[in-house]
C-alpha cells in the first residue's frame, strides 16, 4: 500500500492528527508497559524495542490496522450499521479492562473534538458517524482521517506512528530513557511501519484478532499496582 503525495494542507492535517498535543489523553495510558517495567520485563531501550516490535507484528498488524481499514471503508461507503458493529468488534479485541478503558476514553475524547471542529466540510461523514454508538479510538481516528482529507495509507501509517510515539514517550518516563535514546528508538521502530501495513493487508476480515497474553496480564496486574504514573 503506497501513500499518495499529500498536499501541504493534508500534510499539516496528518501532523495535527498524530500530534502529542491532540487532546485525547494518550499520554496518560501505557497499555500495560508500566507493569512490564515494574516486573523487569522491559528495562532498557533494547527490551522496549523488542516489546514494541512484537506488539506491532503480532497484535497491531492483525487487529488494529485491519479494523482501522474496515472503519475507513465503512465511512467511505456510508455503511453506518457496519461501522457501529465493527466498533463493538474493536472493543472485543481489547484484552483487559484498562486497555478497553484506554481505547474508549481516547475515542470519546476524539469524538468530542471532532464534534466541535469549526472547519468540518458541509455534508461530511461526520453527519452520521458522530451520531452512531461508536466510541473506540480506532473508529474515531478513521473519521478524523476522512474529515482531514487523508487517504487510507496516510490514515494507517499515521495511526501506527501515533501508537509508537505514545509508547516510546511512556518508556522514556518509566525505564527511564534519555530523550536522545528515545528518539533513536523511535527512528528504528518506525522502519517497521511498512512491514506492519503489509502484514495487515494480508489479514482477511474473518482472521482479525489478537492474543498478547503478556501484555494482557501486565495490564490486568497494573490495576493493582501500588504506585503508578499511568492509567493503564
Image: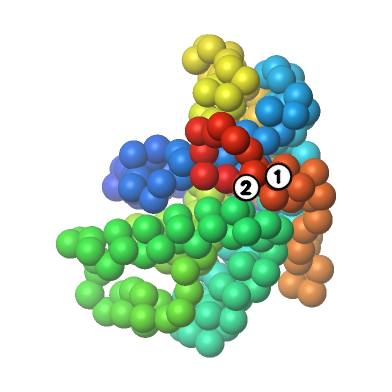
- Left or right: residue 34 versus residue 79 is right
Residues at circles 2 and 1 in contact by the CB criterion of under 8 Å: yes
Please name the residue shown 71% across and 58% down the image: 95
Mark 1 — residue?
221
The residue that label 2 is drawn on is 223
Q: Quick check: 154 left or right of 146? A: right
Query: How many numbered discs?
Result: 2
Q: Quadrant of residue 225?
A: top right
Q: Is residue 52 visible?
A: yes
Alpha-carbon distance for marks 2 and 1? 5 Å
- Residue 81 in the image: above or below residue 7: below
For the residue pair 212 and 191, the one nearer the viewer reads as: 212
Q: Report the residue at 59% width, 53% height from top.
A: 98
* Quadrant position of residue 52: top right
Of all residues shown, which one is farthest toward the bottom? Answer: 81
Q: Name the element at disc 1.
A: helix
Q: Residue 23, labelled with which disc?
A: none
Q: Nearer the viewer, residue 105 or 169?
A: 105
Residue 131 drawn above or below residue 102: below
Please say if 209 is above or below 48.
below
> Which is nearer the eye, 104 or 46?
104
Give me the residue at 80% from left, 44% from top. 214
x, y percent for residue 142: 48, 63
Q: Is residue 7 visible?
A: no
Q: Residue at x 62, y 20 (%)?
A: 175
Residue 44 placement, left or right of 20: right
Q: Crowding near pointer 1: few (<14 within 10 Å), some, many (20+)?
A: some
Callout 2: 10 Å neighbours few (<14), some, many (20+)? some
**Where is 70 relative to 153, above or below?**
below
- Front in this rendered view, residue 226 or 202: 226
Q: Position of residue 127 (x, y in %)?
A: 31, 80
For the residue labelled by badge 2, is the local secondary structure a helix, a strand or a loop? loop
Amino acid at each position: 500500500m503506497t501513500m499518495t503525495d499529500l498536499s501541504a494542507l493534508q500534510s499539516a492535517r496528518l501532523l495535527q492528527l498524530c500530534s502529542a498535543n491532540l487532546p485525547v489523553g494518550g499520554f496518560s495510558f501505557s497499555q500495560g508497559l508500566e507493569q512490564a517495567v515494574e516486573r523487569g520485563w522491559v528495562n532498557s531501550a533494547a527490551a522496549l524495542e523488542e516489546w514494541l516490535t512484537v506488539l506491532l507484528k503480532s497484535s497491531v498488524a492483525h487487529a488494529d490496522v485491519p479494523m482501522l481499514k474496515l472503519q475507513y471503508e465503512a465511512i467511505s461507503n456510508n455503511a453506518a450499521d457496519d461501522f457501529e458493529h465493527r466498533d463493538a468488534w474493536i472493543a472485543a479485541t481489547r484484552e483487559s479492562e484498562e486497555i478497553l478503558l484506554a481505547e474508549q476514553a481516547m475515542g470519546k475524547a476524539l469524538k468530542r473534538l471532532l464534534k466541535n471542529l469549526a472547519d468540518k466540510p458541509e455534508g461530511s461523514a461526520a453527519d452520521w458517524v458522530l451520531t452512531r454508538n461508536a466510541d473506540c479510538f480506532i473508529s474515531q481516528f478513521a473519521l478524523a482521517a476522512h474529515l482531514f482529507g487523508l487517504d487510507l495509507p496516510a490514515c494507517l501509517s499515521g495511526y501506527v506512528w501515533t501508537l509508537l510515539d505514545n509508547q516510546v514517550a511512556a518508556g522514556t518516563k518509566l525505564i527511564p530513557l534519555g530523550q536522545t535514546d528515545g528518539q533513536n528508538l523511535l527512528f528504528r521502530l518506525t522502519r517497521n511501519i511498512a512491514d506492519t501495513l503489509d502484514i495487515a493487508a494480508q489479514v482477511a476480515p474473518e482472521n482479525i484478532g489478537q492474543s498478547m497474553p503478556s501484555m494482557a496480564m501486565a495490564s490486568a496486574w497494573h490495576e493493582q499496582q501500588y504506585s503508578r504514573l499511568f492509567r493503564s
